[in-house]
Amino acid sequence: MLTNPRADRVRSVRALSKRSVRERTGRFAVEGPQGVREAVRYAAPRVRDVYLTSEAIERHADDIVGPARAAQLWVHEVTPDVLAAMAEADAPQGVLAVVDTAGDSLDDVLAARPRLLVLLTHVRDPGNAGTVIRGADAAGADAVLVSEASVDVLGSKVVRSTAGSLFHLPVVTGLDVASTLSTLRAHGIRTLAADGAGATLLPDADLDGPHCWVMGNEAWGLGEPVRAACDDVVRVPIHGRAESLNLAMAATLCLYASAGRRPSGDPDG
Amino acid sequence: MLTNPRADRVRSVRALSKRSVRERTGRFAVEGPQGVREAVRYAAPRVRDVYLTSEAIERHADDIVGPARAAQLWVHEVTPDVLAAMAEADAPQGVLAVVDTAGDSLDDVLAARPRLLVLLTHVRDPGNAGTVIRGADAAGADAVLVSEASVDVLGSKVVRSTAGSLFHLPVVTGLDVASTLSTLRAHGIRTLAADGAGATLLPDADLDGPHCWVMGNEAWGLGEPVRAACDDVVRVPIHGRAESLNLAMAATLCLYASAGRRPSGDPDG
């Protein structure tokens, strides 16, 4: 039982709330039962330590502690004070894990012959980034690509808003937009810029072959060079008086439009 | 020019950040140029005062100040200190308005023979509520209905996340869920519960006639009595490993599925 909130180990976990520490150590923290459960289930080889309060050990005996022990992971009992000192969130519900960065690369993603991708360019809001990763997972996308100068997807707010989806599909970060678009095209993947100024309406977009949605920044959208470098520029129809949709909603609608066109569109079919 | 951040008028505007004050006075504050522009454009009779810094008066001469003066609204020049003292947000970009509550009622909404509605039951997160209002607007919904025990849609975070859509369509609040469902049915409006446990997949849902999407709380979804009281329970297909979508994403997908089935689905058509 870890009882000292000022212990070195506790400090080193808490330090993972800093991007520089995450990058130096190649580790990040996952807070809360949902994320930790999915990490244990889908990324056990990367989970270094799982920390739970006594209460959480009882509550999550079946969905976290059992599977973690079965995977021979380190499971540590800690006091509520220790968990609070480790966590960035106010209420991680007694559960936290330290996980190695996946280090997914674009080459790995392309080698798996993806059918559906999404590229986030210069996304800044943690909630948006996390929600898009969750939506991409739900829509059955093969990976999420994130450009350089974007929010760190291993920050606690992003991790939390992915609701575990971060461990369900590869998330490649730090990409240069222009060279990524060239690489995708060279691999026969159509690039579709999602933009309110697009000439093609979403219901009319060609979504039959492998393709990648390219989403812009929350505030200023996609720049003209990026739009010009894509195979098509597609807009979600606006039926009312709204000027636009927010990034996460637009991405979800685009990704689900793609999912709906795939032969495997009905998961029960 | 208002220059004293401690003036009574400034305090009374700032007090609108409290729900109790909004309810007592029947007014709320709109912060930032996007919301104020839409309020002036679509709800001018309800706008009591518009406050702008000198810089904002120049920047928004055409889209806010001109239309506000044309509508004979009170436009006040204030110092940045006064605006900061009035506003709840850190960065309202020099623009704030005080607006009367619309007081939309379900009877008013039904009298307009709506085709597409959404009912939010016990929604608690301001960002979710605002995003659903924005998505409902974009999908061409006729109104948003909000149950009692929900977040106050006139709070600053909700207002901001609607991105002006709050002034584009009626938002009826404080509704009892059970009696609202009965009333809708009595008016020939099908009620569709959106729920991950639904037997009907979204692409197969009957969306031809007038209908209302019924969305649950972020954490616990819809209760069994509400599901049972609806005409159908519909689920958004999950193609990957995600457990669910968040409320705003699910609502947007449902509302856009409805929009896509309407004869007027293509806004340019």
Image (cartoon, coloured by chain):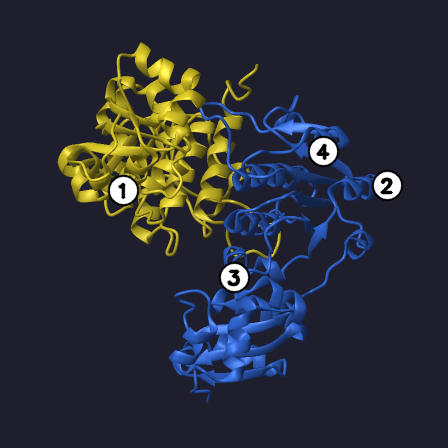
Chain colours: A blue, B yellow
Q: Nearer the N terminus, badge 4 or badge 2?
A: 2
Check disc 4 and report the residue beneath it: A226
Query: Secondary structure under badge 4?
Result: helix
Q: Residue at x 13, y 37 (%)?
A: B24
CB within 8 Å, label 3 to label 1: no
Amino acid under disc 4: Val
Q: Nearer the N terminus, badge 3 or badge 4?
A: 3
Amino acid under disc 2: Ala
For discs 3 and 1, the disc positioned in front in the rendered view: 3
**The N terminus of chain B lies in quadrant:** top left
Check disc 2 and report the residue beneath it: A186
Query: Secondary structure under badge 2?
Result: helix
For discs 4 and 1, the disc positioned in front in the rendered view: 4
Above or below A106: residue A235: above
Check disc 1 and report the residue beneath it: B152
Residue lying at the far right in this picture: please name it: A186
Q: Which mark is residue A156?
A: 3
Count of numbered tags: 4
Cα–Cα gap, marks 4 and 2: 16 Å
CB within 8 Å, label 3 to label 4: no
Cα–Cα gap, marks 3 and 4: 29 Å
Residue in the foreground of this view, choosing between A12 and A237: A12
Q: Residues within 10 Å of mark 2 (few under 14, many from 20)?
A: few
Amino acid under disc 1: Asp
Q: Residue at x 81, y 54 (%)?
A: A107
